[in-house]
Image (cartoon, rainbow, N blue to C red):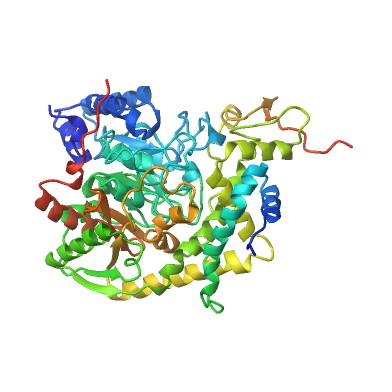
Amino acid sequence: MSDLTRKTAAELAELMTSKQASSVEITQAHLDRIAAVDGDVHAFLHVDTEGALAQAKAVDTKRAAGEQLAPLAGVPLALKDVLTQEGVPTTAGSKILEGWKPPYDSTVVKRLKAAGIVILGKTNMDEFAMGSSTENSAYGTTHNPWDLGRIPGGSGGGSSAAISAYEAPLAIGTDTGGSIRQPGAFTGTVGVKPTYGGTSRYGLIALASSLDTPGPCARTTLDAALLHEAIAGYDPMDSTSINQPVPAVVEAARNGDVAGLRIGVVKELGGEGYQPGVEARFHEAVELLTKLGAEVVEVSCPHFEYALPAYYLILPSEASSNLAKFDAMRYGLRVGDNGENSAEKVTSLTREAGFGAEVKRRIILGTHALSSGYYDAYYGQAQKVRTLIARDFAKAYEQVDVLVSPATPTTAFAIGDRIDDPIAMYKNDLCTIPSNLAGNAAASFPCGLADEDGLPVGFHVMAPVMRDDLCYQVGAALESALAEQWGGVLMTKAPELEVTR
Amino acid sequence: MPSITREEVAHLARLARIELSDDELDHLAPQLDQIIGLVGQVSQVAADDIPPTSHALPLTNVMRADENVPCLTPEQALSGAPAQEEQRFRVPRILEED
């Protein structure tokens, strides 16, 4: 048997259906891979060896008994540590939740379990998903498997690094401003932010409730679509869940025909501040799609330039409110409870000790933006800008089916480069933020390596609300055309990691 | 003149229930000043007659039938408590003495 960790999720499912491999074998192969490379990569915060093998064994037993199983049954997955899984440590990358074992499953986890997908463990992330590099994790930085001296992107850098290090074929991320797509771009993998409300937020430790969206990470477009289908759909436990059928994402990923599809290149997402190698790969991909029969035009979205400032008012405002629940009373860390200190003092001491610098920055910024006297100028005005951005999208979609841009202005940067420069860090998310503000579907697909540093570049596709299928359609077309040129998907060009025994 | 002073940051931290050391304040205040400079760009957009969007998609209130459904047991609910007593969360004193 060739190396099971190099297979796609779809291939692994096929191996199990045809009885050529068991889920226990496949799961064990990935656990071995984690043991061999995660010392260098640090994608995982917790590996649930026993739990994963038990889940795998249960799937094998059901299969042997002839039970009808879901398409991805028995395939292993890495779970971002921001989603609750009953009895498994869940930290959101924060010291304030160190050692917490949630008493319930998030909806995403419930659905993964129902589909027989094997959860290997929890992946590293920026604390409470605030960041673009995993450097804000309280548990150390994840390293990019393409170059261990570089960041893997964030906040879901652990999930994307896990799949690009072949530690798992699938992973779950969450995207509030780009936290699935930007790490996808930086690690040469696929990352999809579903339509807001298309996947459930129940059991997702909230950052900004009007923006947070769980979604799939994978090495191929089809794998991402299969995972998307497994986790998406209406959930009565999430009051903003959309009660409509899941878009036909798997069909779109299998079809991948862009003939006649109208594609708009967003004029404002390029030029100054964009790395030449990123722009070169992006424009080549656009040309390729044109050759495949897509109709490409340039589109202007004039308010996108204000998406970043609007986002950094809306997000901290919502976060300052959501994170108020970490008060040291019901769960998590408690500091200074000496019988003398008041509850309020204990809360303040706990939050000082338990939150990292970026979380403090954003809570204070959000508190400022919501304070009386500033509310209209900041939060209120940002909400108006949000309307204008949604209108830019609506107007563009009158002319085209999807919008495209680079996923990020640059490739992965060196660890430590931007850690003390919040604004440089925030600018990573220039291209991804507008889709969060408008709630539409968006995805990043690998489109090559930048000439100047040999690192992966992401191609960003933005589709209207509940047209997630269009992202997959474009991604699949691009992927198969590029794989033909390269003799395989981009990940096959990734350097081999050193294996420790 | 900075858009936010060190004293204002200290005040906001108190409102947000976060103790900050002098060192942290020295570090945070200038960073927040820069960030506020960035986010303040939203004021350049003429949007007086634009309605605000709090949420990307249209929202309606969601109701469910008032029926009993399984929920956490007291043991589960208390399983993460920093301290508990008599099947309740034990908290530090909430009133000042005298």
Up the image or down, B54 lies above or below A20; here it is below
Residue A365 appears at what percent x and percent y? 59, 55
- Residue in the picture at 48% in, 50% down: A238
Residue A364 as seen in the image, left or right of residue A120: right
As drawn, is A254 to the left or to the right of B16? left
Residue ID at (42%, 68%): A305
Residue A30 placement: quadrant: top left
One can see residue A192 in this view: yes
* Residue A148 locus on image (x, y percent): 31, 37
Residue B18 shows in this picture: no
Towards the viewer: A295 or A19: A295
Q: Where residue A487 appears, x then y in whole percent?
A: 10, 47
Furthest-right residue in this view: B98
Q: Is residue A234 above or below residue A158?
A: below
Quadrant into which the N terminus of chain A falls: top left
Q: In this view, which residue lies farthest toward the top?
A: A501
For image coordinates 71% across by 54% down, the residue present is B7
- Left/right placement of residue A196 relative to residue B36 reads left
Q: Residue at x 69, y 56 (%)?
A: B8
| Count of numbered badges drawn on the protein | 0
Residue A121 horizontal/vertical position (percent)? 38, 31
Image quarter in which the C terminus of chain A is found: top left
Front residue of A106 and A163: A163
Between A387 and B39, the one lying in front of the other is B39
